[in-house]
Image (tube, helix red, strand yellow):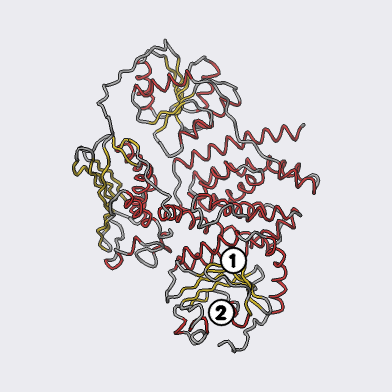
């Protein structure tokens, strides 16, 4: 085998010329930028050996490796000399059964390689300059998700190099190229959300690159980079929770919470994605305790995963969440959680494997319904953290039921609270209610008048602003979801146009994760979820009136990177800010309209354009908000939270444009 003739691509001279283009970049880029990729390959494929190597005319040399420890080796004794002859994955399930590999010394002895998978690293010009490899000492076969991950990571390696080159060409500074791909922490050393830092850098700078003048070939390549980066980011996000569990970094946070309220929250969150012809039910046992002690966030995560799966795989019939009290001891409640559907069901032979990573019940599930096959694996791990076990009953074509029983602690020192009667010691306040639902108007009016306050009502933001301009009010109760001008937009106008610091309390039926924080950041002073209790509303009013007024602080553009480029290319700052002022409002309007008509393709296209601006002006917070909308578009499921993020983007971009106009005019 070692004496076999050296295989050469018929375009070897051109291939070597392209490799030279990368030589300087390969020397200057930090090694851990590639170590993350090999760590990811080793983790996803569950192999002890993974490496990134480049092949010149005489040798194979390693940019990153796991399980080898080799320095450069002669080209003629490598497996990779065959891989670069191909344009797709070379997978050898058992090297002893391969005529090409069975007599190789690293198969019969040495490393004792029994499994090899090599993905050529293809440049935009179509030349294989290197390989991304996974190897094992045992025979194996990759599943479709693992093969797709290898393909994505291989493209990520090449695009990392290309981004470095393009950034050097555009900005003339090696520091910019390095910042595009630098990883702040090793992948396996710290499996946390920091893993998204280098990936976001790659995606962000690619989008910046897309906003510059590119030829046709470069634009196609940038689009490929973006697709590969987005896919890789989705896979990494899916494995974050599994990684934390395995490393012992995830534990349950035990706090008292309202069980029924939490389950209704899950139900409300998911009912927006119910398909036509499917009945979605929530059955709560009358004997369920109100307050239990446990990890509300992890329970929500389990139920959202299970119910979300059921809704995804059910096109007709029903999906039912059922929760029952199975008994109690002196210290615990024993509660059974069940999600049952009439969907596609699971073949009997696959019932055990569905909880494995990257596994779905049938091979065409991923193609038809999407997903990485990690959701149920995460559920299994989280249920086991509750000292329980997830179980499933299913029949192909007839539906499934996933269920588990968990013990939750009774709240300590729980005393039966006497009924709290609302007490008004605030005098006769005048309240402005902004609410479009007539029943909610009537309810709130009765409650407010019962407190002894006066109340005026507006059905949307514009009517509310008009009333506020004509009358004096002590406080505003602000619904978030309204026609014409919603709660976020109205609050922005009151704070920034009217310069009015009147206390504002948000009121919404969508108590989504992080919504209270967003309301406060938008300039509101309190938050009351619907349905509300009278004493809760009165207490919120008292707290808002006592609270020290603070102005709404909109995100501010960071022009430092643009100003650096302006030193090299005078006039760049003026050109970029003028283009943003001119184009951003129309792009934002197009995004909003596309969301409202569920045009997922246009949402992704328009969001891509807006992301370029946000990264250019270093608006990381707004970029995160927009990324959420993009994620929802890819999942084809917009929710009330999507509208909230749109509102934040709208208000913030308006404010940024005003500041940039002032600077341009000065």
Label located before the other in sequence (1 or 2): 1
Q: Mark 2 points at which residue?
A: 79
Task: Where is residue 447? Give x, y as percent.
Answer: 35, 20
Q: Mark 1 points at which residue?
A: 64
Q: Which residue is drawn at 33% across and 17% down?
A: 422
Q: Distance between the residues labelled 1 and 2?
A: 17 Å
Q: Please, is residue 12 above or below residue 349 in the view?
A: below
Task: Where is residue 291? Give x, y as percent.
Answer: 28, 34
Left-right relation of 601 to 62: left
Left-right relation of 471 to 58: left
Q: Residue at x 46, y 41 (%)?
A: 641
At mark 1, the secondary structure is: strand
Identify which residue, 138 or 382, lies in the foreground.
138
The reply to whether residue 49 is visible in this rendering is yes
Which quadrant would the N terminus be assigned to in this image? bottom right
Identify which residue, 377 or 305, lies in the foreground.
377
Would you call the spot at circle 2 few (<14 residues within 10 Å), some (14-19), or many (20 or more)? some
Q: Please, is residue 451 above or below residue 464 in the view?
A: above
User: Which residue extends farthest top?
Assistant: 427
Identify which residue, 443 or 128, lies in the foreground.
128
Confirm or deny contact between disc 1 and disc 2 (CB under 8 A).
Answer: no
Q: Please, is residue 324 above or below residue 411 in the view?
A: below
Q: Quadrant of residue 7?
A: bottom right
């Amino acid at each position: 085998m070692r004496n076999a003739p050296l295989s050469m691509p018929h375009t070897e001279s051109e291939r070597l010329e392209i490799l030279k283009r990368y030589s300087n970049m390969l020397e200057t880029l930090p090694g851990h930028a590639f170590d993350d990729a090999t760590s990811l390959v080793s983790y996803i494929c569950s192999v002890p050996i993974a490496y990134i190597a480049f092949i010149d005319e005489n040798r194979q040399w390693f940019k990153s490796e796991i399980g080898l420890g080799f320095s450069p080796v002669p080209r003629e004794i490598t497996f990779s000399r065959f891989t670069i002859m191909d344009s797709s994955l070379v997978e050898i399930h058992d090297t002893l059964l391969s005529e090409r590999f069975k007599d190789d010394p690293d198969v019969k002895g040495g490393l004792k390689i029994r499994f090899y998978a090599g993905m050529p690293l293809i440049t935009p010009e179509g030349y294989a300059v290197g390989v991304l490899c996974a190897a094992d000492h045992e025979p194996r076969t990759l599943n479709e998700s693992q093969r797709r991950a290898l393909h994505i990571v291989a493209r990520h390696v090449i695009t990392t190099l290309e981004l470095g080159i393009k950034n050097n060409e555009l900005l003339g500074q090696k520091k910019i190229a390095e910042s595009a791909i630098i990883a702040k922490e090793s992948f396996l050393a710290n499996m946390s959300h920091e893993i998204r830092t280098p990936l976001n850098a790659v995606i962000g700078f690619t989008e910046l690159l897309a906003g510059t003048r590119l030829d046709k070939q470069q634009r196609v390549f940038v689009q490929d980079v973006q697709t590969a980066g987005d896919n890789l980011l989705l896979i990494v996000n899916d494995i974050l929770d599994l990684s934390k569990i395995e490393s012992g970094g995830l534990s349950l946070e035990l706090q008292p919470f309202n069980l029924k309220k939490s389950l209704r929250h899950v139900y409300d969150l998911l009912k927006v994605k119910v398909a036509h012809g499917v009945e979605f039910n929530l059955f709560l046992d009358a004997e369920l305790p109100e307050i239990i002690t446990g990890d509300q966030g992890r329970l929500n995560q389990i139920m959202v995963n299970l119910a979300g799966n059921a809704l995804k795989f059910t096109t007709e019939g029903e999906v039912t969440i059922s929760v029952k009290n199975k008994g109690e001891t002196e210290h615990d409640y024993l509660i059974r959680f069940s999600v049952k559907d009439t969907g596609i069901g699971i073949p009997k032979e696959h019932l055990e494997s569905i909880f494995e990573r990257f596994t779905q019940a049938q091979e065409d599930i991923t193609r038809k319904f999407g997903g990485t096959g990690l959701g149920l694996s995460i559920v299994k791990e989280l249920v086991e953290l509750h000292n329980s076990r997830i179980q499933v009953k299913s029949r192909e074509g007839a539906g499934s039921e996933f269920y588990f029983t968990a013990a939750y602690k009774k709240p300590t020192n729980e005393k039966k609270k006497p009924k709290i009667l609302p007490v008004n010691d605030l005098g006769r306040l005048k309240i402005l209610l902004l609410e479009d639902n007539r029943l909610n108007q009537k309810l709130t009016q009765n409650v407010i008048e019962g407190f002894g306050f006066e109340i005026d009502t507006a059905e949307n933001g514009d009517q509310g602003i008009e009333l506020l301009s004509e009358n004096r009010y002590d406080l505003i109760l602000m619904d978030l979801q309204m026609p014409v001008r919603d709660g976020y937009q109205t609050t922005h106008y009151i704070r920034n146009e009217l310069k009015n610091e009147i206390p504002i309390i948000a009121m919404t039926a969508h108590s989504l994760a992080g919504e209270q924080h967003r309301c406060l950041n938008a300039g509101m002073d309190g938050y009351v979820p619907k349905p509300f209790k009278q004493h809760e509303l009165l207490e919120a009013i008292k707290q808002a009136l006592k609270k020290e007024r603070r102005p709404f602080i909109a995100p501010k553009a960071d022009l430092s990177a643009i100003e650096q480029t302006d030193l090299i290319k005078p006039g760049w700052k003026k050109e970029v800010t003028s283009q943003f002022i001119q184009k951003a409002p129309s792009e934002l309007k197009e995004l909003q309209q596309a969301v409202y008509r569920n045009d997922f393709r246009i949402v992704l296209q328009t969001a891509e354009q807006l992301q370029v601006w946000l990264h250019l002006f270093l608006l990381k917070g707004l970029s995160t908000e927009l990324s959420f909308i993009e994620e929802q578009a890819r999942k084809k499921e917009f929710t009330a939270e999507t509208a909230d993020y749109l509102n934040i983007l709208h208000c913030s971009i308006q404010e940024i444009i005003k500041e940039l106009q002032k600077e341009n005019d000065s």
